């Protein structure tokens, strides 16, 4: 039934600042933009990673009623080759710690930050990810 993540969406009060931050982090411009009722945009979408997963940034005014504004809920970990280096870069760009660098065993290391817009961005080195990618 579940075939893999298609799109991860993050909300931001300042969508343009969020777009600029993620452009710097990812080294890529969004490939898709949805206009927003007289504002520059309501939504930006990036394709990233080995499987071209989608990361969407949405103007918070389009969040569902009652949507939380504080970090929480499920974590989706993005695979990185070096968690320590990725964590250092995220912190240097203004993200704040959410979960510390943690090794869960050989080949499994995680950490998470809160981006400057209040979203949890989790990263992980996962040897199983690399095994599947290698097939």
Image (tube, grey):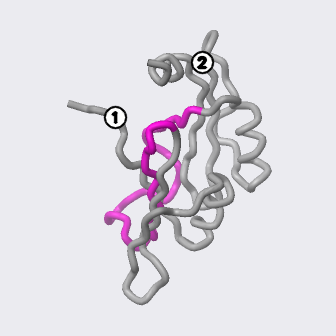
Image quarter of residue 23: bottom right
Q: Name the residue carrying label 1.
A: 4
Q: Is residue 82 above or below residue 51?
A: above
Residue in the image at 62% along x and 11% along y? 105
Q: Is residue 63 above or below residue 6?
A: below
Give SS at disc 1: loop
Give how far across and how far down residue 36 sits, in percent.
39, 80
Give how far across and how far down residue 127 sits, in percent.
56, 17
Residue in the image at 57% along x and 39% along y? 122
Image quarter of residue 101: top right
Relative side of 6 to 131, left or right: left
Q: Crowding at label 1, few (<14), some or many (≥20) Cα neighbours within 10 Å?
A: few
Give how far across and how far down residue 96 sits, in percent.
70, 49
Residue 97 on the magenta segment: no
Front residue of this view, candidates 133 and 109: 133
Q: Name the residue carrying label 2.
A: 108
Give the extent of the magenta segment.
50-79
Q: Residue furthest front?
A: 135
Image quarter of residue 132: top left
Q: Is residue 35 above or below residue 77?
A: below
């Amino acid at each position: 039934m579940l075939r893999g993540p298609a799109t991860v969406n993050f909300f931001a009060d300042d969508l343009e600042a969020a777009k600029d931050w993620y452009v710097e982090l990812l080294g890529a411009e969004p490939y898709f933009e949805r206009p927003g009722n007289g504002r520059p945009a309501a939504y930006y979408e990036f394709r990233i990673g080995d499987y071209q997963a989608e990361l969407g940034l949405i103007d918070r005014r389009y969040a569902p009623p009652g949507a939380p504004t504080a970090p929480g809920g499920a974590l989706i970990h993005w695979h990185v080759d070096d968690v320590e280096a990725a964590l250092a870069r995220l912190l240097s760009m203004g993200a704040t710690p959410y979960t510390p660098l943690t090794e869960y065993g050989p080949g499994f290391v995680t950490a998470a930050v809160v981006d400057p817009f209040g979203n949890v961005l989790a990263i992980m080195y996962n040897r199983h990810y690399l095994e599947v990618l290698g097939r």
